[in-house]
Image: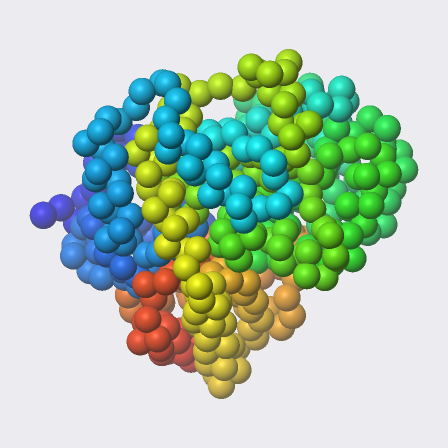
Amino acid sequence: MSTNEELFARAQRVIPGGVNSPVRAFRAVGGVPRFVQRAQGAYFWDAEDKRYIDYIGSWGPMILGHGHPAVLSAVQEAAVQGFSFGAPTEREIELAEAILAHLPSMDMVRLVSSGTEAAMSAIRLARGATGRKKIIKFEGCYHGHADALLVKAGSGLATFGNPTSAGVPPEVVQDTLVLEYNDLAGLEQAFAEHGAALACLMIEPIAGNMNFVRASVPFIRRCRELCTQHGALFVFDEVMTGFRVALGGAQSVYAREIPGFVPDITVLGKVIGGGMPLAAFGGRRAVMEQLAPLGPVYQAGTLSGNPVATACGLATLHEIGKPGFYEALARRTQALVAGLRQAAADEGVPFSGDSEGGMFGFFLLDALPQNYRTVMTTDGARFNQLFHGLLERGVYIAPALYEAGFVSAAHSDEDIAQTVDAARAVFRLLAR
Ligand code: PLP
């Protein structure tokens, strides 16, 4: 049996950084990544057979926990029938119907293989449908790694982006306007200056890529009004929040406060694939009919609507559609955050936390941040101490302070209690 350390050394010889997605490398927190051997329910076991309570769940998809029997048998049955055809199947229609049934903002949906692909295609669709070039995104929101979206803001007010990654020519992001999250004044100014040129505004409505930060209700309301007024499309990136915070996604959470609220385009991923490579984007019929083969906006994929992935997604949606599912999930997630808050308070450690459905976040700060700038004021060294303290005690949270956490239906009250106990022990060390 190889140790995590041996596997990491071997991996680094053949895979850049030893990982196939950067955060997995533990660069932010230091130390050796855990190589997963197998997973079941709320747990996974690393190469050394140590068990962890898993609060990443593949970064969101595993809402039922690992190896749910109904999902597993759907995948097994589908795999026997064939891995990929490159021709349409009835299951794709079923999955499209199942998605649309819960999202009234969407009349049609196109299935793709990753959130990156879905967000990139949504931008192309918005540009094609409006005949405009400029897009708005917000600092701290991640929409995958398509070139035009790999931008962060400069300092101060609205700034046209500079690429965050090498290899992205400045010309590619010159039409991407980056604003501060929850900043109404910046939003007003951007529309006043660029409204007529804007194809869309894309947002993570509850941002999970700067830990957990909600867009305020007035902010979402104003985004909606300004997009409508200026003829720009409002794109909700619900890759993380879709079917995670509620059956109707974050848009249903905002619709409780803003009657009749709908975005124009929704981007989905993660939960709809149940752990398989599957994502989607959709919207009103008139917008979606701009896509090839009906319209002029090209978009395609060899593995799009893959029969095994769609079987996995369908079985997952079937399970989470059962009555009471989200109530139970939300209750457990709230219990986790409340338990952590209490433990931190008892030990005198600054703490703030929040959750919606099965998604949560917490900060070693007294108050919940409203934007990326404030998130980044968290003391990284203290977070790293917390991360490693939990890891040592068999609790696996995201190895970076700017990531959200996920609870699954498989997490028991006992798991939550164990997690809170582990956190309490680490808070005690942090308080010294
Ligand atoms: N959009 C959001 C909100 C995400 O959280 C992510 C991934 O974490 C993406 C898009 C990109 O999805 P993928 O990693 O499947 O390409």
- Left or right of 91? Residue 6 is left
Tell me the residue at 21%/39% (across/down): 76
| Residue 65 image position (x, y, % from top left) | 32, 56
Tell me the residue at 90%/37% (across/down): 192
| Residue 273 image position (x, y, % from top left) | 40, 41
Tell me the residue at 33%/30% (across/down): 307
| Residue 86 image position (x, y, % from top left) | 36, 18
Considering every residue shown, the one lying at the far left of the view is: 1
Task: State the image quarter where residue 384 is shown.
Answer: bottom left
| Residue 196 image position (x, y, % from top left) | 86, 28
- Left or right of 70? Residue 281 is right
- Left or right of 272? Residue 159 is right
- Left or right of 30? Residue 234 is right
Considering every residue shown, the one lying at the far bottom of the view is: 346
Between 184 and 29, the residue placed more toward the observer is 184
Asked if residue 355 is positioned above or below residue 127 in the image, the reply reads below
Asked if residue 402 is positioned above or below residue 80 in the image, the reply reads below
Q: Is residue 310 visible?
A: yes
Considering every residue shown, the one lying at the far right of the view is: 192
Q: Is residue 26 visible?
A: no
**How many marks are shown on the rendered structure?**
0
Tell me the residue at 33%/38% (across/down): 311
Asked if residue 69 is positioned above or below residue 231 in the image, the reply reads below
